[in-house]
Amino acid sequence: MNALNDLKVRRAALAFILITAVLDIVAMGIIIPVLPQLIVEFVGSNADAGWINGVFVALWAGMQFICSPIIGSLSDKYGRRPVILISCAGLALDYVLMALAPNLWWLAAGRIIAGITSSSFTTVFAYMADITEPEKRAKAYGLIGAAFSGGFVLGPVLGGLLGSMDPRLPFWVAAVLSGLALLYGLFVLPESLAADKRMPFSWRRANPVGALILLKRHAELAGLAVVNFLLYFAHHVFSAVFVLYAGLRYGWGPIQVGFLLALVGVLDMIVQGGLTGVFTKRLGDRKTMVLGLIGGTIGISLMGWAPTGWAFIAAMLPNALWGLAMPTLQALMTRRVGEDEQGQLQGANTSVGAIAGVLSPLFFGWLYTHSTGGGFGGVARWVEGWLGDGPPARLIIGGLYDPGLSFYIAAVVLFVAAVIGWWVGRQASRAEATESSSDGLDPA
């Protein structure tokens, strides 16, 4: 009877996590097609909006860096449920603030608040670790990824349609969706962390630097954290410049961008929800992670090259394999710490991603502004003076003024992540085998 009750609780918990993830990501996805355009309205220039949007994404990520380890540690002490519910309430209020924003300063404040409240995604991953056996976590994280992707199927489409009527309307709808997630959680969400498995709160562990110390415990864990950083760094090319790039190069507006992001969500659902379990069963977590990173490298390179909108859409197919990387990376890392440290680990992971989220949008926003606004004139003159007016110089100068330059750089970053991931993942697999043998267990 207890086993049956436990099974019912786990199913209710899993259903809540997936449904709430969909609601939250729909709310976030709704504003993606319209926020950069709102910035353009305030500043009056596509090129200038590039670096400002990068700053806004960096503000969001900076708050995640500061708050994620705190929220993760709070969830280790007080449980996952209250942290998730408070976050839903905070996001609802934040979207109301952004809907009313009369200038860039209000939008900046909204991005800061959103960064704080969305830090609870660390708790969502810790919650899933609480209710899932270690050997099944890659598949479970794939389900979370699929739920996020499902939210992105509906969110950007809805945001594009609503934004075409009124650029403020998507923010109001996002607030309603976050409120629905809060109400749903109040009545459905069970607690996942038993009282005897909780850890006292400590500012030494909860501050961003202290949380990162956990990643130094094992060389493999630190190496996987580097892969995590590079993955997030490359991925933020989309949040920093994609909407502006699509408008400049292909003439796409909010509706077209919304439908394209919905297609991205469909592909991610297929990959993370359907293929992650299949690939990990046949290849293992490490090889599947590397396969995802290589697929992303190819896809994002083709996106930077794509001369037409249809070519860009075709590049999304290999790029979709990128979805294999995150759940398998998470699974590899969770096996290196105990149950009472899952919240701290996810807080540290989110902090790593947040560091990338601060640096990457600033970098790609700056790069996009200079590659589309002629800001590399001095570099171009230096290259021409050094190499002359031959084909090598023209190739380099043409690359500096290519709107796809940001995507090419992101592809290089992903390739480096794949190389590091292959090596570190192999070391982690050997360490697990050694630990299993020393405990008298079958290494397989």
Image: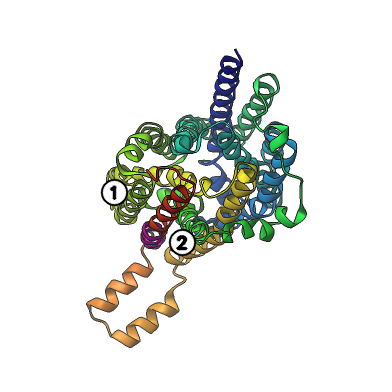
Q: x%, y% of residue 442?
A: 40, 42
Residue located farthest toward the front when viewing the structure as drawn = 440
**Quarter in which the C terminus is drawn:** top left
| Viewer-proximal residue among 267 and 52 | 267
Q: Is residue 85 among the parts visible in the rendering?
A: no
Residue located farthest toward the top when viewing the structure as drawn = 1
**Looking at the image, is 385 positioned above or below residue 368?**
below
Q: Amino acid at mark 2?
A: Tyr
Residue located farthest toward the left when viewing the structure as drawn = 391
Local crowd size for mark 1, using a 10 Å CA cut-off: few (<14), some (14–19), many (≥20) = few
Q: Does the magenta run of residues contain 130?
A: no
**Looking at the image, is 60 positioned above or below residue 16?**
below
**Looking at the image, is 307 positioned above or below residue 29?**
below
**In the image, is 425 to the left or to the right of 132?**
left
Q: Amino acid at mark 1?
A: Thr
Q: Secondary structure at mark 2?
A: helix
The residue at 61%/29% (across/down) is 173
Q: x%, y% of residue 241?
A: 47, 53
C-alpha distance separating marks 2 and 1 = 19 Å
The image's mark for residue 308 is 1
| Viewer-proximal residue among 415 and 301 | 415
Q: Earlier in the sequence, mark 2 or mark 1?
A: 1
* Highlighted range, magenta: 404-423
